[in-house]
């Protein structure tokens, strides 16, 4: 049930909670992150390619729930969260093993616009 990745760990990685100065789109749910809202920004270099991800606080919290559940079930911390942009797929599938051990996706996010 742990998450595996098709790439090496990033050679550069930085995550921060920040306040938006301009509009962004959440990499998980696709909803707008409006100026003045707090969100998580992640910058990394994976397999030589630089990428930046913006994540709204609701998705940030849901990702934390998934990580906690995976760690409690014995996953290594580096394999306890789904890849960026795959959070809702993991929630709908109940995890890699399909056992349905995650809480239900909130109704407002059932049909993510991403």
Image (cartoon, rainbow, N blue to C red):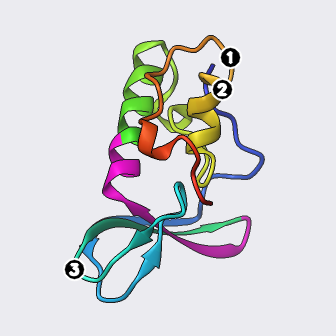
Residue 105 on image: x %, y %: 47, 33
> 17 or 22, which is in the foreground?
22
- Answer with left or right where residue 8 lies relative to residue 101: right
Q: How crowded is mark 2: few (under 14 residues within 10 Å), some or many (20 or more)?
A: some
> 97 or 105, which is in the foreground?
105
Residue 27 on image: x %, y %: 54, 62
Label 1 – label 2 distance at C-alpha: 5 Å
Q: Name the residue under label 3.
A: 36
Label 2 – label 3 distance at C-alpha: 33 Å
Q: Residues within 10 Å of mark 3 (few under 14, many from 20)?
A: few
Q: Residues within 10 Å of mark 1 (few under 14, many from 20)?
A: few
Q: Name the residue under label 2.
A: 93
Q: Give the range drawn in magenta.
A: 47-61
Residue 40 on image: x %, y %: 35, 64
Q: Name the residue under label 1.
A: 98
Quarter-wise, where is residue 17 in the image? Answer: bottom left
At horizontal 52% and vertical 55% (from top left) the residue drawn is 29
Q: Earlier in the sequence, mark 3 or mark 1?
A: 3
């Amino acid at each position: 049930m742990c998450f595996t990745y098709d790439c090496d760990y990033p050679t550069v990685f930085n995550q921060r909670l920040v306040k938006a100065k301009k509009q962004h789109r959440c990499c998980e749910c696709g909803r707008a992150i409006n100026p003045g809202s707090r969100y998580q920004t992640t910058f990394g270099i994976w397999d030589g390619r630089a990428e930046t991800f913006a994540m709204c606080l609701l998705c940030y919290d849901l990702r934390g729930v998934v990580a906690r559940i995976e760690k409690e079930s014995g996953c290594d911390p580096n394999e306890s969260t789904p890849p960026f942009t795959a959070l809702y797929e993991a929630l709908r599938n109940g995890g890699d093993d399909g056992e349905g051990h995650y809480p239900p996706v909130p109704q407002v996010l059932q049909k993510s616009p991403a």
